[in-house]
Image: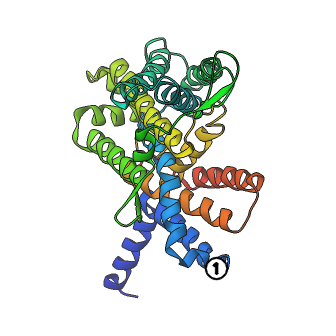
Amino acid sequence: MNTSERTPLRAIATSLGSPAGRALVALLLVLVLGGVVNAEGACFKLGPHRGMLRQAAVCGIRACGMTLVIITGGIDLAVGSVLALVAVSFSLMTIHWAWSAWLAAPLALAIGAACGGVSGTLAARLRLQPFIATLAMMVFARGMAKWVSGGQKISTAVQNADGTYRYVDVPGVFRAIDSRIFGDNLSVVTLIFLACAALTWIALARHRWGRELYAIGGNEEAARLSGVPVVWAKTLAYVVCGVLVAVAGICQAAQEQQGDPEAGMGYELTAIAIVVIGGTNLMGGRGGIGLTLIGTLTIGYLDKILSVNAVPEAGRLVLTGIIIVAAVLTQKRRRW
């Protein structure tokens, strides 16, 4: 084989060895699996694909926030608990207290930002390990969700002073977020996910703050000596992650038409899996939202395939854990 023949093959091999190449290969394998194990043709119909995009949207919004944190070399274990706290708070404000969405939504986003700000302050300014800082926030936010809700789901069944219940209408904002457009082919929550992904991509790819996050993840000390405001940039990453998790919490509350204090269990696992499968380096310094989009599709389709084939939840969790380990092992040890 001459040099001209080897060059295209080498280029293809290099592409497949890149983070994006490996992420696309993983997505392709999942799609092939869906074609083989198609549950009597269910995977070849449009309905399951629409449902996948709707279900994966909330996961993708969380993963966008997780991507920011992981690029800095950190981790956020509190995303599931913060989501539950926001879902409960937003449901309480809109369903039980009948507050306007224009007031409830900013307050819900502020709750997410505050939780992220505390985690970021502990990790960046007080120099706690991100694992410990966000673990503490995970426990705290879960406790707050149960305290605010009284340990019960916040639904359209509102308890009166005498102990009886009355039922109220589902708030208009819930119906709006959970609606479909373009002939019921596209969910509004999917558009919200794409908007969050676009804004996050702009922040990482076009803004100075994004370059600072990559520098911090690559070498925090070198970034500090180069004049990068490490504490501010890292803290803001956790704050934005909290805001995105709050958006996901609002969307989940709208989809379920209630706020569940037990919601979000294991969601940090899913968010990390999406980011890692997409190819973002867990050590920090490399990755991007484009890779996270691929990871979202991969996990979304895998979950849908397992669902239509009636695979129990225990099997799904086991498989997700195996996939995370495999994805990390395939990442190159050297920095990309």
Give 192 or 184, whichever is nearer the viewer: 184
The foreground one among 97 and 81 is 97
Residue drawn at point x = 52 percent, y = 30 percent: 91
Q: Is residue 25 visible?
A: no
In the rendered view, how is the structure colored? rainbow
For residue 80, what is the image quadrant?
top right
Against 152, is 2 above or below?
A: below
Residue drawn at x 53%, y 50% as measured from the top left: 274
Residue 180 vs 259, above or below: the answer is below
> Is 41 on the left-hand or right-hand side of 1?
right
Q: Position of residue 35 (x, y in %)?
A: 59, 78
- Residue holding disc 1: 36
Q: Nearer the viewer, residue 121 or 330?
A: 121
State the image quarter where residue 163 is shown.
Answer: top right
Neighbour tally class for label 1: few under 14, some 14-19, many 20 plus, Cα within 10 Å: few
Q: Quadrant of the N terminus?
A: bottom left
Q: Is residue 176 above or below residue 299?
A: above
- Residue 77, horizontal then vertical, whole percent: 58, 31
Which element is circle 1 on?
Answer: helix
Q: Position of residue 73 (x, y in %)?
A: 47, 33
Please name whichever residue, 234 or 101, is drawn nearer the observer in this view of the structure: 101
From the viewer's perspective, tell me whether residue 72 is left or right of residue 203. right
For the point 54% across and 78% down, which residue is it?
A: 44
Q: Quick one: which residue is furthest to the bottom in this view?
A: 1
Please say whether residue 28 is visible from this viewpoint.
Answer: yes
98 on left or right of 315: left
Callout 1 amino acid: Val
Q: Where's residue 48, x and y in %?
A: 55, 68
